[in-house]
Image (spheres, helix red, strand yellow):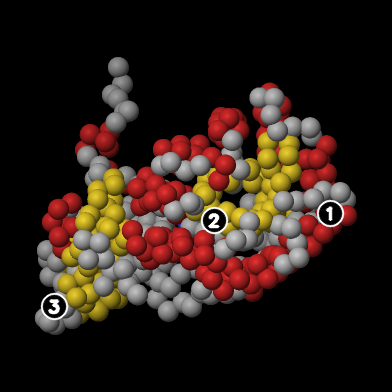
Amino acid sequence: MSYFPRQQAHLYAEALPLADIARQFGTPTYVYSRAALTDAYNQYATALGDHDGLVCFAVKANSNLGVLGLLADLGAGFDIVSEGELERVLLAGGKPERIVFSGVGKTATAIRKALEVGVHCFNVESEAELELLADIAKQLDTKAPISLRVNPDVDAQTHPYISTGLKENKFGIDIQRAPQVYKRAAALGSLNIVGVDCHIGSQLTQLTPFIDALDRLLALIDTLKADGIVLKHIDIGGGLGVTYRDETPPPIGSLIAQVKEKLQGRNLALVMEPGRSICANAGVLLAEVLFLKPTEHKNFAIIDAAMNDNIRPALYQAWQDVQPVELKTTEAKTWDLVGPVCETGDFLAKDRTLALAAGDLIAVMSTGAYGFTMSSNYNSRTRAAEVIVDGNRAYLVRERETLADLTRGESLLP
Ligand SMILES: Cc1ncc(COP(=O)(O)O)c(C=O)c1O
Ligand SMILES: N[C@@H](CCCC[NH3+])C(=O)O
């Protein structure tokens, strides 16, 4: 079912015309569907069923407080990678004991804060981090719950920039070295070993890399057991892909069912860190056509959203569908949809056949993940508003930035 259906000529978010949202909140605006977020989260929760574990939403995919709050209300845990993300989760009502803390560069301040609030565990990504964490835990007279994020050297078969589980990637601890690092962790009195973790990449559309990584982690768990180190949980990371165009990723339920089957007979809780698969198709970026600029070589539609709002096309050559908010019967042409930013890479879509006129509204689909969170103020553009739609009601969950926001904290030389 579509959470952004078309009824006659009009495109909706749930039961609210997107044109109404543009009128009320302006453009560019990110619009999220509450029902879509709820449904995707519930697919994970249902698939986990009564198996002990946690569904920890990867906050980097969409860190709007409204989104985090609704997921927290559904019982979600959270995967964080910074002090800022910790702050957001706590503000949104997320429970500290359902937070896993990942990331290759955790600062001492962030570690201290996470220990003080009592996160579920730290996914430790290096030996240096392990030592720092042990020191801080000792100073605080506590034991830090840890899981090693191992790098299983599995090819996720995705875009090279979003592949994270190959040995040449910066993430995690080489799986071959992991047993030694676990022994070191066990010897440090201020750590409590609870699990093992991996995250091999994002937008995975095949099951095989997940299962390969899982097999490698299970073999590691057996080695550790023989050494007297018994783990409580296995964290398979996030990474499940979504359909942007014609990709056919495995359904959430079948991925989790296969993982659970592999875990049968083992006393292991299952932790997951999904981001994109919960929110990508729950959001659209609503924008307006500013000018049409047909040239001899190309037709450009210049829109009021740009690469600073959605950098995925520029960064990964990502393809996201573009839908007119009002379908028209006028002649369609092939357009490149470009933003006002002074970069040739500033495009949101290329070669799309659409009937467009200046003033028309368009929706860039599947932008609920890594859309707003990767946005910037480049070219001194104010960042977009964010709205959550619930049925026929719209809630502004982030105001559009103002010009005053742009220069906050800056000053002239004395
Ligand atoms: C450690 C970690 N966990 C989870 C995720 C979420 O990934 P995805 O949005 O692909 O599910 C990421 C991002 O790729 C990540 O780096
Ligand atoms: N930001 C990326 C995914 C990277 C995920 C972070 N580990 C994207 O938009 O596809």
* Residue 113 position within the rendered picture, expressed as x and y whole percent measured from the top left: 55, 31
Q: Nearer the viewer, residue 75 or 411?
A: 75
- What amino acid is labelled 1 in the image? Lys
Q: CA distance from mark 2 to mark 3?
A: 42 Å
* Whole-number angstrom distance, CA of label 1 to CA of label 3: 65 Å
Residue 174 visible in the snapshot: yes
Identify the residue at image location x=71%, y=46%.
194
| Point 63% across, 56% down: residue | 52
Q: Is residue 354 above or below residue 120?
A: below
Above or below 273: residue 12: below
Which quarter of the rendered picture does the N terminus lie within?
A: bottom left
Residue 199 occupies quadrant: bottom right
Residue at label 1?
225
Nearest the camera: 23 or 69? 69
Nearest the eye: 59 or 40? 40
How busy is the neighbourhood of tag 3: few (under 14 within 10 Å), some, or many (20 plus)? Answer: some
Judge whether 290 appears above or below 5 on screen: above
Marked residue nearer the N-terminal end (2 or 1): 2
Task: Give the x, y percent position of residue 276.
Answer: 46, 61
Going from N to C along the chain, the mark reached first, 2 or 3, is: 2
Q: Is 337 or 385 nearer to us in this picture? A: 385
**In the image, 357: left or right of 31?**
left
Q: Which residue is mark 3?
A: 328
Disc ID at residue 55? 2
Report crowding for label 2: few under 14, some 14 to 19, many 20 or more residues within 10 A (C-alpha). Answer: many
